[in-house]
Image: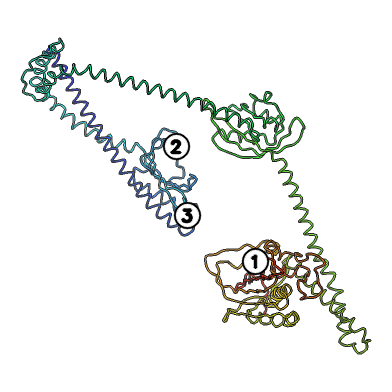
């Protein structure tokens, strides 16, 4: 028996030493492997940070991530400088690769996430079973938005190869140490281990036989001496065991009560879940939208009441059927598209689309807007939930609106055509009328009856007014067709304003109004058509005179202005002008015409520059040019806007509202670029 104990001890010692060496070797290798992996990760992070700085520096210049040249070469150079790194790529914010060290990169094909080492490093496995450490660093625009990511990776096999070399060296060294240590263990076991164990074993047998008063032999080894003392205290421990068992019993009883309470809580939770499930079923059944659920085998699983009414088929006839045979029965348009959509939703996408079908009951063609989302069934299988909303009335309304829009466009085109034809046909006879009346009044006035002269003068005045109307119609027609030519020359805007102001002396005196000018000195000369600008300013000031009560005040001011708005001539005065914003300030001259008139309502400020908007009530029209609140053809402001926008400028109005009693007034702003736009296409006058 002594020989068997020694053998077991020796075998045990050998196994312990062997396992200790193996474990120590394994731990050392694992520590080395982890440290080596971390060093490669740090190198990858450092290389990625350097590449990130270069890319973000280019992004700060305003270039898009997809438009940077030379990034592929930098990725290839980065991979070539480090033998452990096998790929480097840059992807956009959606995960689409933009640049790569290898155009035929297959390391990440079908890669799946395994684990994360840190927020920027993850372990991936591809379809071939290869495992890679992927280091990802975000790339941001200058405003902090995510532009993309830099990904650098190295294979796990690089760590395995280096760890294998370390393992071989460690195995040789520790194998020799094993032999030396085991020899010492054999000597120690025989002298200091086996003999004291046999002596203590005899004492243990006495205790096992119920003899708790034993003599513990004196042992030289402290551990065995402590073991002997422990054997002496074992008797005392046996007595204390009953006390501990009773205490454990009480704890077990308390634990049983806690488990019972937990079971009752689970029962209550189950009742709440069943109540919630019933509530969900009730909401689903009574929902106003049609809800249809199908499984991954394309079978209809559920339809609510709204779906029965919407599709015109009872649930008993369609539940369990193939969803596409159901769609074919109601003659859904684009059945193939519905199949593709169904498969995409089964893959996890949430989609929306419109369907058109024929309800079997009344053969009415209906349109529904469907929202498709993936759901999970009881057994975890993917399913598709489709929610349909009846948009038939909305579609019919939209179609009617589009039809009305086309009709309005046709009528507007007819109106423009009539405007052009009418102005052309009226121009020739008006020229004859005005010419002959001038001839009668200038050269034949002495031969005419004195009673006839005033009548001819009335004809001349009416012809002149009609000629002005025809001229406005011609100008509008030319603006619409973009045939109005501007004759550019450098013009002093202040002198132009003063000229127009002097021309308004007669109507101002007639209405007892005051016109003051507040002109900024030393304004740059503007490259423009002075005659057309004079016409525009005269129209604006004329409107201010008409809609300002007698004795009112009109102020015209000018000032220099720098703006990021880029000078741009809009293609048509009927379209809303676009404001092109640049990065450098452009020189402008702003002209303001401010009056103390009746003001303009906020709703009308958006439309006063439209053709014929001023027409209003026919009884408000006046033959007088400056009569208070008199209205004309409604073309004056349209012409003004067309002329200003052809110069690359802009016009707008500010008014607190329409109030004939308090007269809040209006302010028209004209913004003109100092330098003309499209100068190479304009006819410049010397």
Nearest to the observer: residue 505 or residue 271: 271
Give whichever of discs 1 and 2 has the lower sequence position. Answer: 2
Tell me how many marks there are: 3
Q: Which residue is at the far bottom? A: 446
Percent across and percent down for residue 322 are: 64, 26
For residue 12, side relative to residue 410 (left or right):
left
Percent across and percent down for residue 553 are: 67, 77
Q: Quadrant of the N terminus?
A: top left
- Mark 3 lies on residue: 68
Residue drawn at x 47%, y 54% is 68
Nearest to the observer: residue 231 or residue 66: 231
Residue 136 image-quadrant placement: top left
Percent across and percent down for residue 327 are: 68, 31
- Mark 1 lies on residue: 656
Q: Which callout, 1 or 3, points to the residue nearer the camera?
A: 1
For the residues labelled 1 and 2, the Cα–Cα distance comes to 64 Å
- Mark 2 lies on residue: 111
- Determine contact: label 1, label 2, CB under 8 Å: no
For the residues labelled 3 and 2, the Cα–Cα distance comes to 27 Å
Q: Which residue is at the far top? A: 209
For the residues labelled 1 and 3, the Cα–Cα distance comes to 51 Å
Callout 2: SS:
loop
Instruction: Decide: is 467 above or below 211.
Output: below
Q: Quadrant of the C terminus?
A: bottom right
């Amino acid at each position: 028996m002594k020989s068997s104990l020694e053998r077991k001890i020796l075998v045990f010692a050998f196994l312990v030493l062997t396992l200790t060496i193996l474990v120590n070797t394994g731990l050392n290798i694992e520590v080395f492997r982890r440290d080596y992996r971390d060093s490669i990760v740090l190198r990858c992070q450092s290389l990625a940070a350097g590449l990130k700085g270069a890319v973000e520096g280019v992004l700060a210049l305003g270039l898009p991530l997809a438009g940077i040249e030379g990034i592929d070469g930098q990725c290839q150079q980065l991979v070539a400088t480090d033998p452990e790194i096998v790929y480097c790529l840059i992807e956009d914010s959606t995960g689409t690769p933009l640049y790569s060290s290898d155009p035929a990169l297959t390391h990440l094909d079908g890669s799946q996430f395994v684990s994360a080492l840190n927020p920027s490093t993850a372990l991936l496995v591809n379809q071939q079973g290869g495992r890679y450490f992927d280091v990802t660093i975000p790339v941001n625009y200058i405003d902090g938005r995510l532009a993309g990511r830099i990904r650098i990776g190295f294979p796990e096999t690089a760590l395995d190869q280096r760890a294998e070399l370390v393992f071989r060296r460690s195995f040789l060294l520790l194998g020799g140490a094993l032999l030396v240590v085991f020899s010492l263990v054999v000597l120690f076991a025989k002298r200091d281990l086996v003999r004291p164990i046999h002596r203590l074993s005899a004492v243990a047998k006495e205790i096992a036989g119920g003899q708790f008063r034993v003599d513990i032999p004196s042992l030289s080894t402290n551990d065995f001496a402590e073991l002997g003392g422990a054997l002496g205290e074992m008797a005392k421990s046996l007595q204390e065991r009953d006390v501990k068992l009773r205490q454990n019993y009480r704890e077990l009883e308390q634990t049983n009560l806690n488990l019972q309470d937990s079971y009752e809580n689970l029962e209550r939770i189950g009742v709440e879940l069943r109540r919630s499930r019933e509530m969900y079923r009730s909401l689903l059944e009574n929902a106003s939208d049609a809800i249809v659920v199908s499984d991954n085998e394309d079978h209809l699983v559920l339809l609510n009441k709204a779906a029965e009414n919407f599709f015109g088929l009872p649930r008993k006839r369609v539940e369990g059927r193939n969803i596409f045979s159901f769609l074919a029965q109601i003659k859904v348009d684009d059945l193939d598209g519905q199949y593709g959509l169904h498969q995409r939703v089964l893959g996890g996408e949430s989609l929306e689309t419109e369907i058109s079908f024929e309800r079997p009951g009344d053969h009415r063609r209906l349109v529904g807007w469907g929202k498709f989302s993936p759901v999970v069934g009881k057994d975890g299988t993917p399913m598709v939930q489709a929610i349909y909303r009846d948009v038939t009335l909305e579609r019919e309304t939209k179609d009617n609106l589009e039809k009305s829009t086309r009709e309005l466009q046709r009528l507007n085109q007819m109106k423009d055509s009539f405007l052009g034809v009418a102005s052309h046909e009226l121009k020739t006879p008006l020229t004859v009328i005005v010419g002959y009346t001038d001839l009668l009044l200038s050269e034949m006035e002495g031969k005419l009856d004195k009673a006839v002269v005033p009548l001819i003068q009335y004809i001349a005045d009416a012809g002149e007014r009609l000629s002005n109307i025809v001229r406005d119609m011609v100008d509008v027609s030319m603006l619409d067709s973009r045939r109005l030519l501007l004759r550019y020359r450098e013009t002093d805007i202040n002198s132009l304003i003063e000229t127009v102001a002097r021309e308004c002396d007669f109507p101002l005196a007639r209405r007892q109004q005051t016109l003051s000018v507040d002109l900024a000195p030393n304004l740059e000369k503007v490259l423009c058509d002075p005659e057309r600008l004079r016409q525009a300013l005269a129209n604006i000031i004329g409107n201010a005179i008409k809609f300002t009560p007698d004795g009112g005040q009109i102020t015209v001011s000018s000032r220099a202005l720098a703006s990021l708005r880029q000078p741009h001539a809009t293609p048509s005065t009927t379209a809303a002008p676009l404001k092109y914003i640049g990065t450098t300030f452009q020189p402008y001259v702003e002209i303001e015409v401010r009056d103390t008139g009746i003001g303009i309502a906020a709703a009308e400020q958006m439309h006063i520059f439209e053709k014929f908007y001023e027409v209003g009530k026919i009884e408000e029209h006046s033959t007088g040019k400056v009569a208070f609140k008199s209205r004309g053809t409604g073309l004056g402001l349209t012409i003004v806007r067309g002329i200003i926008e052809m110069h690359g400028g802009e016009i707008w109005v500010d008014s607190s509202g329409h109030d004939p009693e308090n007269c809040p007034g209006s302010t028209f702003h004209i913004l003109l670029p100092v330098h003309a736009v499209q100068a190479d296409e304009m006819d410049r006058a010397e």
